[in-house]
Amino acid sequence: MKTKKEIRELTKAELQIMQLLWKKDQAFVNELIEEMQEPKPAYNTVSTIVRILEKKGFVSHKTFGKSHQYFPIVEREIYLKSYMGNMLSSFFSGSVSNMVSFLSKKEGITLKEADEIMEIISKSKT
């Protein structure tokens, strides 16, 4: 598996494909296209994105004749942790409280959500 430093940020199209692969565990290009919303992209477009993901080290494949079945080699949680860490560093000076403050002002946090956040923090300290 890749370490945090080696994980690059994905484009929107790459992330869409990765979300499908994380959900399905493995898939042929046609299966990925079936899961996508209309208007569905062309086969060659999805195939190209998957090959880019493979070059970036996010995906590998098994060969079945002329077909390839793709599967993720970077776990969703590992990518999410790296992505959020980069966002925290880039936009909030590494401060979780700055990020939560921003989100509460921008999105509004309900009392229930604040209680849930406090419960998560409480559990993480034990």
Image (cartoon, grey):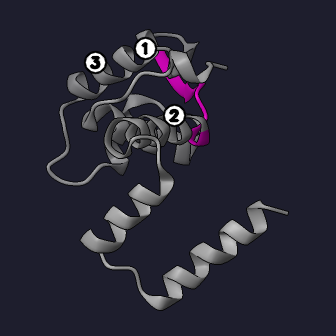
Q: Please give the residue where the numbered disc 1 appears in the rendered image.
A: 56
Earlier in the chain: of badge 3 and badge 1, it is: 3
The residue lying at 34 percent from left, 15 percent from top is 52
The percent coordinates of residue 86 (x first, y second) are 42, 34
Marking on residue 48: 3
Give the Cα separation between the discs numbered 2 and 3.
24 Å
| SS for callout 2 | helix
The percent coordinates of residue 99 (x first, y second) are 40, 56
Earlier in the chain: of badge 2 and badge 3, it is: 3
Task: Tell me the quarter of the image containing the N terminus.
Answer: top right
Q: What kind of residue is marked 3?
A: Thr
Task: Tell me the quarter of the image containing the C terminus.
Answer: bottom right
Question: Which tag is nearer the camera, tag 3 or tag 1?
Answer: 1
73 versus 120 height, above or below: above
Give the Cα separation between the discs numbered 1 and 2.
15 Å
112 versus 103 height, above or below: below
Residue 119 is inside the magenta segment: no
